[in-house]
Image (cartoon, rainbow, N blue to C red):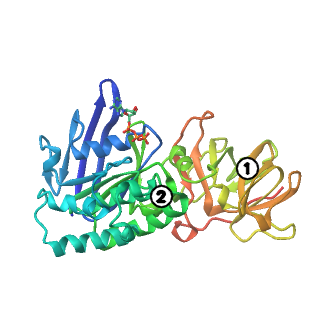
């Protein structure tokens, strides 16, 4: 295992930018996730480390060794792509053993080979398939065997490109837990690419968010979730997307949702905003609770009233679109708290879950100004004066 340093890396394909001026520093044994939408530069980041593309500027170093000019074969990285090749004429066991027999990373006794294969196949839940041929496997099993082929070989850094993409939701969740355990047990340095925010939050010790080839934010899952650098990161995390409401500073409050000010929250501590200044409030759908008609909001909570105009059932949950003032809030409720279209509903939100971003045009991403930080971490407790109208 080893550290990985990516410093000022720019990789272009002709005129198209893959990644630009990218800086990432991955610790020894760290499980580091790269998150971003399609085309953000995730795969290019991995290929730049593996030496599979020529970088135009910057440098990559593993364990302090500058890899400029080092052939992929000599970088001691193991890379797993979304689509994998297995030897069709070899059994699963032989497929897994072949990377250990190539001599590329030293020689392994038969007992060593078996021990490594046992560890990886148990983790990936494929040890009952060892004597089968690839043609006798499902796509998901094949993907797990191919991932096993990568993980079985000792490497300084593992580069994993959406390795769970072909698995169904249940297996993905199970595999995430197993991969996490494998990472923790074997102290693996891994750069793991995904466009799935849930996977990133579950797996990453830290997460880097990319957009258009540029780094937007690096942080722990907690930091990225609580203090997203801008509305792009906030929208990338969470499904349905975070609600964004225009608001204006008025007498120590951020007032939004129309002339009546149906949503009004105290300016979060530490935020210096002038009266009349425009901002955007961010409230995640899952942070909005449906309250009973007689429930008073708990201290430090915002209360708003609105009318349901759409209710869509999603299994045990219901997604509600609620008109509040002149705006719409999307929320997710359990079916027990579901409401019908046309119902008047009372909603409570912990003020600690209200994010504040700079104002911007519709569709424009703007930076975070404050908010979204749990009360115990805030410098001073602000008064709980969310207004209900
Ligand atoms: N071989 C190539 N030739 C030309 N342009 C490329 C090539 N590979 C990638 N690109 C471009 O580089 C940019 C980054 O692509 P990259 O594959 O790194 O994104 P990604 O985040 O991995 O996307 P996805 O999630 O769709 O795999 C995109 O604009 C893409 O079109």
Residue drawn at x 42%, y 39% is 40
The verdict on label 2 being within 8 Å of ligand 1 is: no
Quadrant in the picture for the N terminus? bottom left
- The residue positioned farthest toward the top in the image shown: 15
Residue that label 2 marks: 199
When the figure is inspected, residue 18 is found, relative to residue 367, above or below; the finding is above
| View quadrant of ligand 1 | top left
Nearer the camera: disc 2 or disc 1? 2
| Residue 85 located left or right of residue 275 | left
**Nearer the N terminus, badge 2 or badge 1?**
2
Residue drawn at x 25%, y 62% is 94
When the figure is inspected, residue 64 is found, relative to residue 360, above or below; the finding is below
Secondary structure state at the residue bearing disc 2: helix
Q: Crowdedness of circle 1 by 10 Å Cα count: few (<14), some, many (20+)?
A: many
- In this rendering, does residue 66 appear at all? no
Q: Estimate the x, y position of residue 374 in percent, counting from the top left.
A: 56, 66
Any mark on residue 329, and which?
1
């Amino acid at each position: 295992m080893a550290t990985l340093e990516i410093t000022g890396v720019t990789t272009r394909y002709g005129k198209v930018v893959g990644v630009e001026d990218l800086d990432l520093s991955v610790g020894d044994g760290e499980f580091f996730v790269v998150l971003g939408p399609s085309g953000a530069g995730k795969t290019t980041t991995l290929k730049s480390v593996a030496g599979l593309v020529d970088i135009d500027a910057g440098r990559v170093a593993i364990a302090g060794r500058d890899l400029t000019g080092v052939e992929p074969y000599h970088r001691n990285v193991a890379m797993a792509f979304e689509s994998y090749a297995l030897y069709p004429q070899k059994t699963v066991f032989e497929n897994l053993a072949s990377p250990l027999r190539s001599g590329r990373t030293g020689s392994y006794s038969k007992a060593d080979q078996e021990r490594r294969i046992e560890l990886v196949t148990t983790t990936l839940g494929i040890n009952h398939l060892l004597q089968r041929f690839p043609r006798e496997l499902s796509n998901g099993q094949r993907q797990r065997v191919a991932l096993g082929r990568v993980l079985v070989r000792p490497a300084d850094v593992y580069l994993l490109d959406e390795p769970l993409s072909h698995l169904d939701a249940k297996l993905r969740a199970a595999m995430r837990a197993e991969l996490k355990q494998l990472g923790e047990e074997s102290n693996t340095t891994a750069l793991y690419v995904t466009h799935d925010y849930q996977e990133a939050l579950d797996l990453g010790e830290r997460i880097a968010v990319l957009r258009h080839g540029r780094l937007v934010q690096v942080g722990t899952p907690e930091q990225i979730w609580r203090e997203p650098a801008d509305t792009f990161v906030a929208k990338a995390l969470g499904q349905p997307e975070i609600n964004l409401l225009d608001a204006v500073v008025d007498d120590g409050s951020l007032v939004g949702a129309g002339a009546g000010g149906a949503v009004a929250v105290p300016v979060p501590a530490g935020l210096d905003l002038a009266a009349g200044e425009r901002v955007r409030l961010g409230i995640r759908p899952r942070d909005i609770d449906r309250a009973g008609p007689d429930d008073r909001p708990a201290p430090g909570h915002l209360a708003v009233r609105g009318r349901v105009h759409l209710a869509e059932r999603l299994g045990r949950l219901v997604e509600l679109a609620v008109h509040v003032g002149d705006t719409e809030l999307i929320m997710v409720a359990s079916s027990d708290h579901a409401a019908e279209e046309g119902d008047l509903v009372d909603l409570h939100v912990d003020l600690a879950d209200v994010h504040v971003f700079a104002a911007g045009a519709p569709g424009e991403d703007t930076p975070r100004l404050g908010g979204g930080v749990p009360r115990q971490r805030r410098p001073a407790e602000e008064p709980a004066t969310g207004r209900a109208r």
